[in-house]
Image: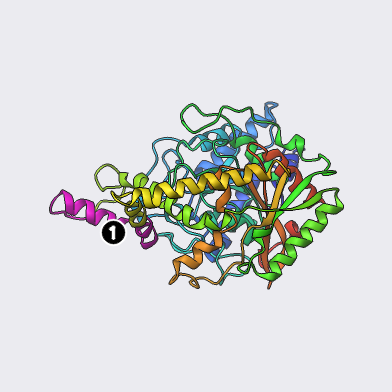
Amino acid sequence: MHQLTLAEIARGLADKKFSSEELTKVLLARIAQLDPQLNSFISLTEDLALSQAKAADARRANGESGALLGAPIAHKDLFCTQGIRTSCGSKMLDNFKAPYDATVVAKLAAAGAVTLGKTNMDEFAMGSANESSYYGPVKNPWNLEHVPGGSSGGSAAAVAARLLPAATGTDTGGSIRQPAALTNLTGLKPTYGRVSRWGMIAYASSLDQGGPMARTAKDCAILLQGMAGFDPNDSTSIDEPVPDYSASLNGSLQGLRIGVPKEYFSAGLDPRIADLIMASVEELKKLGAVIKEISLPNMQHAIPAYYVIAPAEASSNLSRFDGVRFGYRCENPVNLIDLYKRSRGEGFGPEVQRRIMVGAYALSAGYYDAYYLKAQKIRRLIKNDFMAAFNEVDIILGPTTPNPAWKLGAKNSDPVAAYLEDVYTITANLAGLPGLSMPAGFVDGLPVGVQLLAPYFQEGRLLNVAHQYQLNTDWHTRTPTGF
C-alpha cells in the first residue's frame, strides 16, 4: 500500500479495495519502523489520524466521494494545527500548541484528508538543508549521509521514502522546489496569494507560499485543489477562481513555447545537471514544444536582493517571540531586558539569529535606503524581466538546483555557500510567480530536478507540462534503496 500515489489511493478507496483506516494503520506502522533513520517527523498524530480515517470511511459509506477523502498526508510543522504542537522546528515553539487550524489544514481536513503528523523543517523555515532544526537534521533517503534540502526537508524525505503519498510544504525562496529536486519528488510553489497563509507561521510575509509535495504532477494537482482558494482571513489572499487542475493535465504540448534562460547555464552549474536539463528539453521537444533561448539579465542580483528582503521581514515577524506572550521563556530573568535577551538568545538557533541580525541591520536608520530600498527596486527589475520573457514564451525551464544534494554538515561553516544553492529558485518568490520542480535524472545516485516557471495563476499549465513529461519518462517512479 505504501507505494500507492494519491490518485491510486483515491481509486482504491472508491473501489473498496481497502479502507482509509487500514491504509492509515499501515503507514503509521511504516513511519514507526523507518523514520528513526530519517528524522522526517517532529510529531506523529496517531489518534487524530485514526479518528479522521474512520470518519472518512463513514463518509464514503454514506455515498460521498472525493480524491482526498481518506487520503493520508502530513503537514510541515509551521501550519498551525489545533491542540497539536506546532514548533516551526524551533526550541522557541517547542511547547506551543496552536489554538486553531491554519486555513490549509482546515481545508484539507474538510476534504477528508487524514493527518498522520507534522514534518521536520529548518528552524522557522530558514535554511536550504534541513540542518538548522532544533530536532536535528533530516536525512535524504537516497543517501542517508546527504541532506534532503530545505526548509521543507521533512516533508520531502517522508514522501520520497514512501512513508506517505504527499505532504504540504512552504516555499519562501525555493523551500518546496529545492528539496523536491534533491529527493526525486514533484513540488509546486503556487502564485503568491493562491494558497492562504493564515495560520502559517511567517518567515518573510511577501515571499512565503504554501504548496503540495508528492511523487507525481497528478498528485500535486489533487493536493493543490484542496489547498487553493480565496481566504478573507488572509489580506494577501487573491480572490481568483480555482480551476480544476486535474482536468488540464492531458492537454497537448504541441506548439508550447518554452524559454531556456542563457543565464542559467553559468559556471556555477554542475555540467552533469546541465546535461540532464538539456535531455529534458529534448524530451519536451518530442512532445511538440518549441524551445527558445531567452535572457533574464537581472538574475545575477537575485541572491543579494533576496538575502536583504527575507531577513528584513524575518526580523520584523520574529519580534513577537519575546518570552512574554507564548513560546519559550528563560529561567529566572532578573528584569524585562534580561527576559527578552535570554529568551531570544536561548530560544533561537544560530541561523535564525544570523538572519534576524542581518534583517535588523538592513532596516536600521541610515541603512534602509542603501540596502532594503535598493533590494526592493531590484525585485521589481527581476519581475519586469519575467514579464518581458512571458511575452515571448509560455513556460521558462531550467535547473532547480546547481548541484545535487551535498553531505550533511558540508556547508555548515559557510552559510553563503548554502545560500547559493537557491540561485535558480528565489527569483520566482521575488516575482510572486508559480514554479514547479520535477524529477529529471540522477547524478552519482542522487536525484536532480528540472524547474518550470509560468505566468501568474498558470499552475495548471505547469502541472500539464510536468504530467506529460512524466507520462514519457520514468524518473519519478524510482524508489530509494531500502524504502
Residue in the picture at 36% in, 48% down = 369
Question: Residue 246 at what x, y percent from top left?
Answer: 73, 37
Judge by depth and name the residue closer to the eye, 209 or 43: 209
Residue in the picture at 34% in, 58% down = 353
- Compared with 68, 174 (above or below) is below
Q: Is residue 95 visible?
A: no
> What's drawn in magenta, residue-wise?
331-355
For the C terminus, give its image quadrant. Answer: bottom right
Q: Is residue 309 left or right of residue 150?
A: left
Judge by depth and name the residue closer to the eye, 401 or 339: 401
Which element type, helix, strand or loop, lies under badge 1? helix
- Compared with 355, 81 (above or below) is above
- Compared with 50, 215 (above or below) is below
Question: Residue 378 at what x, y percent from top left?
Answer: 50, 49
- Compared with 349, 251 (above or below) is above
Badge 1 density bin: few <14, some 14–19, many ≥20, Cα 10 Å: some
Mark 1 sits on what residue? 346
Q: Amino acid at mark 1?
A: Glu
Residue in the picture at 52% in, 56% down = 301
Q: Is residue 179 visible?
A: yes
Mostly what secondary structure, the magenta segment?
Answer: helix
Question: Residue 182 at what x, y percent from top left?
Answer: 62, 61
Q: Is residue 46 left or right of residue 395?
A: left
Label total for image? 1
**Residue 265 magenta-drawn?**
no
Question: Residue 428 at what x, y percent from top left?
Answer: 58, 48
Judge by depth and name the residue closer to the eye, 94 or 340: 340
- State the scheme by which the image is colored: rainbow
